Image (cartoon, helix red, strand yellow):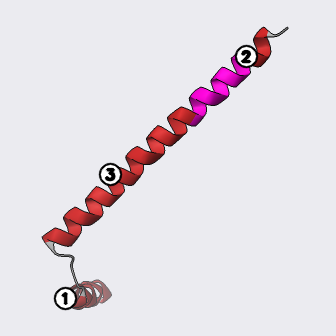
């Protein structure tokens, strides 16, 4: 019956959790989305510049 005790403990701990409000959740979600988009753009630009550099270097020969 240790399993029942475990789930009882989990339930008690879950009641202690401070859940984020809708506003906090929305703000944090937009932060993650905008940061992800920034890094996508940054690495796409970096990849394009490296590719351009390599094409330039290989076309010199």
Mark 1 or 3, closer to the camera: 3
Categorize mark 3 by other alpha carbons within 10 Å: few (<14), some (14-19), many (20+). Answer: few
Mark number displayed over residue 41: none
Range shown magenta: 46-55
Depicted 32 relative to depicted 46: above or below? below
Main SS of the magenta part reads: helix
Quarter of the rendering containing residue 8: bottom left
* Labels 3 and 2 touching (C-beta < 8 A): no
Find out whether residue 23 is within the magenta segment. no
Tell which of 12 and 28 is nearer to you. 28
Q: What percent of the width, then of the height, locates residue 28?
A: 29, 65
Categorize mark 2 by other alpha carbons within 10 Å: few (<14), some (14-19), many (20+). Answer: few
Secondary element under disc 1, as helix, strand or loop, is helix
Mark number displayed over residue 33: 3
What residue would you read off at disc 1?
Answer: 15
Q: What percent of the width, then of the height, locates residue 27?
A: 24, 64
Q: Earlier in the sequence, mark 3 or mark 2?
A: 3
Q: Viewed as shown, does residue 44 lie left or right of 60?
A: left
Q: Which residue is drawn at 59% across and 36% down?
A: 46
Find out whether residue 47 is within the magenta segment. yes
Quarter of the rendering containing residue 20: bottom left
What residue would you read off at disc 2?
Answer: 56
Q: Give the CA separation, mark 1 to mark 2.
A: 61 Å
Residue ranking furthest to the left: 22
């Amino acid at each position: 019956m240790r399993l029942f005790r475990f789930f009882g403990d989990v339930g008690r701990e879950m009641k202690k959790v401070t859940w984020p409000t809708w506003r906090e959740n929305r703000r944090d979600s937009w932060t993650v989305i905008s940061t992800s988009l920034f890094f996508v753009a940054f690495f796409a630009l970096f990849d394009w510049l490296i590719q351009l550099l390599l094409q330039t270097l290989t076309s010199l020969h």
